[in-house]
Image (cartoon, rainbow, N blue to C red):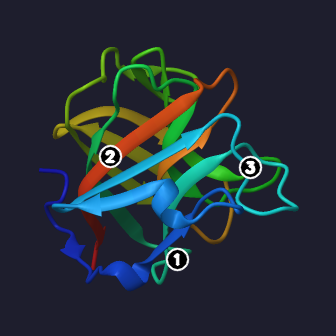
Amino acid sequence: DPTHGFTELPLNTSNYQIQKPYNLPLCNRYSFVNGVHKLWVYSTDKPLSKSSPTKPRTEISITGYNYSSNVWQFEGYGYVPCGTSGVCIMQVLGASPPHATTLQLRVYNGSLSYYRDPILVPNVYDKWFRLNVIHDVNASTVKIYIDGTLKYEAAGRGGNSYHFKFGVYGQINESYYMESCWKDIKVLKKM
C-alpha cells in the first residue's frame, strides 16, 4: 500500500480553493454530490482570471498544505469520461523555471500519461482508478501509483514550494468538453 508509513492530514472544504473561468459562477463548472467532486470546462471558456494567459480550467487547489521539504503524498480516486482529451487532471505545482510544475498527469485520447509520455494507463476512460502520488522533495523524486501499483518514477524539477491540484486544465489539442470526477481525496505526510 503506497500510504504505508504516511500520516493522513486533516482535510476539509476550507482546504479547497477552486479555480474556474473568471466570468462564471462556480455552480456552472463544479458540483459536489454524494462525496464526488465533478469538475468540467469547455475549450472556449475564459481563463481563471482576466489577466491570465493560460488555457481554461476548473481545478481544486489544495491550500494549507504547501510544502518545501520532506515526503508528501496525494491520494484520490479519479474518473475521466470518454471524450475528454488534451487535458491535465492532476498537478504538483511548483518547479524551477522554465517549468511551473513538478508533475502533470494528462489524458490524451483515453490514455493517462506523465506529461505527454510515457503512457501510464493506456485506457483510462469511464472507470474509477486510485491515484497515489508521492513527492520526496529531498530526494527529488515523484512516484506515481495507479490502483496500488507503481507505474512511474520521475525526477523532480527543482523549485522550493509545492502543492497539489486536481480537476481539468486544458492543454494542447484539448477536446471541446473536458471533465474529471474525484472522491476520497487525502493529503498524507511521512512523519
Across and down, in percent, residue 181 comes to: 32, 46
Badge nearest the viewer, 2 or 1: 2
Disc 1 element? loop
Q: Distance between the residues labelled 2 and 1?
A: 23 Å
Q: Nearest the camera: 44 or 108?
A: 44
Q: Is residue 75 among what the camera can see? A: yes
Which residue is the site of mark 3? 46
Task: Give the mark nearest the N terminus, 2 or 1.
Answer: 1
Left or right relative to 132: residue 62? right
Across and down, in percent, residue 186 comes to: 26, 66
Relative vertical location of residue 175 with respect to residue 33 in this rendering, above or below: above
Disc 3 element? loop
Task: Give the mark nearest the N terminus, 1 or 3.
Answer: 3
Across and down, in percent, residue 183 comes to: 23, 56
Q: In which quarter of the image is residue 145?
A: top left
Which residue is the site of mark 2? 181
Q: Which residue is drawn at 53% across and 31% down?
A: 177
**Looking at the image, do the residues carrying marks 1 and 3 touch, with CB atoms under 8 Å apart?**
no
Which residue is the site of mark 1? 66
Relative vertical location of residue 39 with respect to residue 61 in this rendering, above or below: above
Q: Badge 3 local density, few (<14 within 10 Å), some, or many (20+)? A: many
Badge nearest the viewer, 1 or 3: 3
Task: Give the mark nearest the N terminus, 3 or 2.
Answer: 3
Q: Residue at x 45, y 79 (%)?
A: 65
The residue type indicated by label 2 comes to Cys
Disc 2 element? strand
Q: How far apart are marks 1 and 3 (CA)?
A: 27 Å
